[in-house]
Image (cartoon, helix red, strand yellow):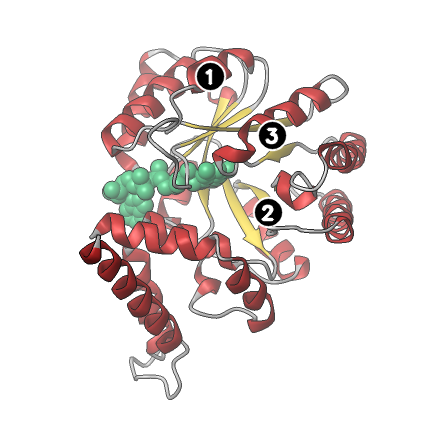
Amino acid sequence: MANLTRDFFIGLSNNKILNKHAKKWGFRLGAEKFVAGTNIESVTEIVKELNQEGISATLDNLGEFVADKSEATMAKDDIIQILDIIHHENLDCHISLKLTQLGLDIDIEFCIENMKEILDKASEYDIFINIDMEKYIHYEKTLDVLHTVLKEYSNVGTVIQSYLYRVAEDLEQLKDVRIRLVKGAYKESEAVAYQSKDDIDRNFIEMAKKRLLKDTFTSIATHDHHIINELKQFIEGNKISRDNFEFQMLYGFRTEMHYSLKEEGYNFCTYIPFGDDWFGYFMRRLAERPQNMNLILKDVLYTKENKLKKRPIAVGALAISAIGLLSICNKKKKS
Ligand SMILES: Cc1cc2nc3c(=O)[nH]c(=O)nc-3n(C[C@H](O)[C@H](O)[C@H](O)COP(=O)(O)OP(=O)(O)OC[C@H]3O[C@@H](n4cnc5c(N)ncnc54)[C@H](O)[C@@H]3O)c2cc1C
């Protein structure tokens, strides 16, 4: 059942029509729990509050499935505007972006030009740019873009997904590059990726330990307290400098742990997604942890006084979920 639910939400996250319509809906289905806002102004306030607590941030102006150059150019201009704001507001904050947002699927050279414009501005302000890792079909091209821009810029890095078999080799090639280590959020085939949680976790821990023993900065991005605890012991046991790494978690997830890790003296960074292209991101979060749906339903069905809302928008979400799950179950039965 867990796999069915995961497949269902991943399927929704890839649905271009739903993604397109979601932009018009505004925040719905409880997305505001995990997506910080639709505009940079509200998000700036959140970053300032985190910074006051000693927590840094990475901003992701959500966007994917960009199909024409004008859309990609707009995304690039928006990111440059965000860099201006980070600089002028003196925020402890960097940028996370997706290359498909900058035209990777349209024309790789065009995407590289967009990246270079962003990196020019980011270098001027000394701001780091992280290239998020997307589905495996984009993997090689993403590394190609990274290696191209690394010839001219040093303030750029990417993400390594521990569910991929190949990552030990890739990490070796990227040994001098700042990396975020994650488990991986997409559905990948057995040909390229581990399928079991045990294998993915084992590889995550192995890769994290390898990186921690090196001098290059690593962001350890997980909400998994088992892994975090094991790595904390490794860090203390090997006297690894806390300047060499940070923990990262997503906005809205295990918020109490963001603060407790910071209080224990670790560097901590919150990944803050915002913008109107929230649907795919939100569905991937539901795929990872269907329990998130419970939290959301509670929020969207009930008022603060614990009374049922008059027209709960979650009814739509529930209906979609039920129809989707039923159709998956039916397909499985027939096959
Ligand atoms: C900062 C950040 C950036 C990311 N960037 C990318 C990217 O660029 N590309 C990509 O493919 N993926 C990215 N991801 C997503 C990542 O790949 C995983 O899909 C996601 O983090 C879920 O895995 P996990 O390690 O957090 O924990 P899971 O494997 O989902 O959970 C492990 C265990 O941790 C505990 N746990 C987890 N979450 C919670 C919770 N909310 N409340 C209570 N307990 C919990 C539970 O005990 C659970 O069994 C990113 C994740 C983070 C945190």
Cβ atoms at labels 2 and 3 below 8 Å apart: no
Work out whether residue 263 can be spotted.
Answer: no
Which one is closest to the eye, mark 2 or mark 1?
Answer: 2
**How many labels were placed on the picture?**
3
Q: Secondary structure at mark 1?
A: loop
Which one is closest to the eye, mark 2 or mark 3?
Answer: 3
For disc 2, the marked residue is 60
Whole-percent x, y for residue 286 in the image: 36, 55
Outermost residue to the bottom: 310
Q: Residue at x 51, y 64 (%)?
A: 18
Mark 3 burial class by Cα count in 10 Å: few <14, some 14-19, many 20+: many
Whole-percent x, y for residue 4 in the image: 26, 52
For disc 1, the marked residue is 241
First in sequence: mark 3 vs mark 1? 3
For disc 3, the marked residue is 142
- Is 144 placed left or right of 218 in the picture? right
Of residues 169 and 268, the one nearer the viewer is 169
Q: Amino acid at mark 2?
A: Asp
**Which quadrant holds residue 334?**
bottom left
Q: Compared with residue 88, is residue 191 higher up or lower down, i.e. above or below? A: above
CB of residue at label 2: within 8 Å of ligand 1?
no
Of residues 88 and 186, the one nearer the viewer is 186
Q: Amino acid at mark 1?
A: Ser
Q: Secondary structure at mark 2?
A: strand
Q: Residue at x 38, y 21 (%)?
A: 165
First in sequence: mark 2 vs mark 1? 2
Picture quarter with ligand 1 = top left
Q: Amino acid at mark 3?
A: Thr
Q: Residue at x 66, y 32 (%)?
A: 128
